[in-house]
């Protein structure tokens, strides 16, 4: 059966997350329903990451096995037709070797978190960014973020429901970018690692927001990390500002 890699973009607001669930809408179920319009008995698809409810994607990657030898462009066009009106789009498609696996072949995942600091409520970005009313210090947030770079036991920054075998991960990048925003400032957190723990990025951003607001210091971030205790974590921020931005493979299937 030919295997295809799909680059998927979606608005996570109406979904319970990527993973298929019996009683709640999911992105996986939406894509599989579109595939079922093209072929019967399509096996379950696999994705690079199981994003949570409300989390968005700019570059989620999934793979599927089909009976027919599809032209990748025609396959993406057909899927986008059948995905309407769900806020999901196949932005790229490629036929790949049967050894390719969207999850297990990935060597890096990149997340983006959008945080807007302004007094006025968000209008056009409502549901697509986290708004806080207070001003934030980006240099302090970056100083706190620098304490998290490297190989650490991230027990403090993972959900108690996390199913990962080990809390030890290597964080390659946690960079804070400041951008002008009408009536305030947008802070973009760029996060890179081979893999992540459940709620890890949202735990990072919620904690660093406290640093930016002056309630925490960078030393407090170090103390929280070294505590290896979930109770030492700062607030976990809401999901609407989080995006799975990209997934990297040894050989880019979409190149």
Image: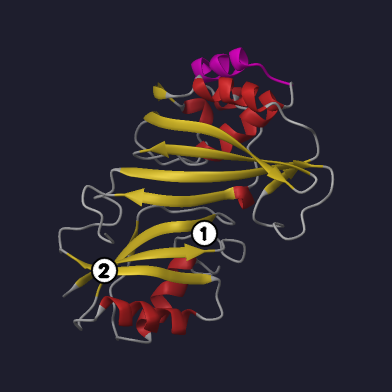
Disc 1: CA contacts within 10 A as few (<14), some (14-19) or many (>=20): many
| Residue 176 in view in this figure | yes
- Give coordinates of residue 91: x percent, y percent: 41, 68
Name the one closer to the observer, 11 or 160.
Answer: 11
Which residue is at the far front?
Answer: 180
Q: Residue at x 43, y 32 (%)?
A: 173
- Left or right position of 35 against 58: left
Q: Which residue is painted at 64% across and 55% down in the image? A: 128
Q: Residue at x 39, y 31 (%)?
A: 172
Q: Which quadrant is the N terminus positioned in?
A: bottom left
Residue 68 position by quadrant? bottom left
User: x, y (%) of residue 228?
Assistant: 49, 20
- Classify the position of the C terminus by image quarter: bottom left
Q: Quadrant of residue 221?
A: top right
- Of residues 19 and 150, which is closer to you in this image? 150
The answer to whether residue 20 shows anywhere in this view is no
Identify whether 200 is placed above or below 12.
above
Residue bounds of the magenta highlight: 215-228
Residue 181 lies within the magenta run: no
What's the CA distance linking mark 1 and mark 2?
Answer: 24 Å
Q: Is residue 158 left or right of residue 67?
A: right
Task: Relative to 24, say whether 143 is above or below.
Answer: above
Q: Secondary structure at mark 2?
A: strand
Residue located beneath label 1 in the image: 17
């Amino acid at each position: 059966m030919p295997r295809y890699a799909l680059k998927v973009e979606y608005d996570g607001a109406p979904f319970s997350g990527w993973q298929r669930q019996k009683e709640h809408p999911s992105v996986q179920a939406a894509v599989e329903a579109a595939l079922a319009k093209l072929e019967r008995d399509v096996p379950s698809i696999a994705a690079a990451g199981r994003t949570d409810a409300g989390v968005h994607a700019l570059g989620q990657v999934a793979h599927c096995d089909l009976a027919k030898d599809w032209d990748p462009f025609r396959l993406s066009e057909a899927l986008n037709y059948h995905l309407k009106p769900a806020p999901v789009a196949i932005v790229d498609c490629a036929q790949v070797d049967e050894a390719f696996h969207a999850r297990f072949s990935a060597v890096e995942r990149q997340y983006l978190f959008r945080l807007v600091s302004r007094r006025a409520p968000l209008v056009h970005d409502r549901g697509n960014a986290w708004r806080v009313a207070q001003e934030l210090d980006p240099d302090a947030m970056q100083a706190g973020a620098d304490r998290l770079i490297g190989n650490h036991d991230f027990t403090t920054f993972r959900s108690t429901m996390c199913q990962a075998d080990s809390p030890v991960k290597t964080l390659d990048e946690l960079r804070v970018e400041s951008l002008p925003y009408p009536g305030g400032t947008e802070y973009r957190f760029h996060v890179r690692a081979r893999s992540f723990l459940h709620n890890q990025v949202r735990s990072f951003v919620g904690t660093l927001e406290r640093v930016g607001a002056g309630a925490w210091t960078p030393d407090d971030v170090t103390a929280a990390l070294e505590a290896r205790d979930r109770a030492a974590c700062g607030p976990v921020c809401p999901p609407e500002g989080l995006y799975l931005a990209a997934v990297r493979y040894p050989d880019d299937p979409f190149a």
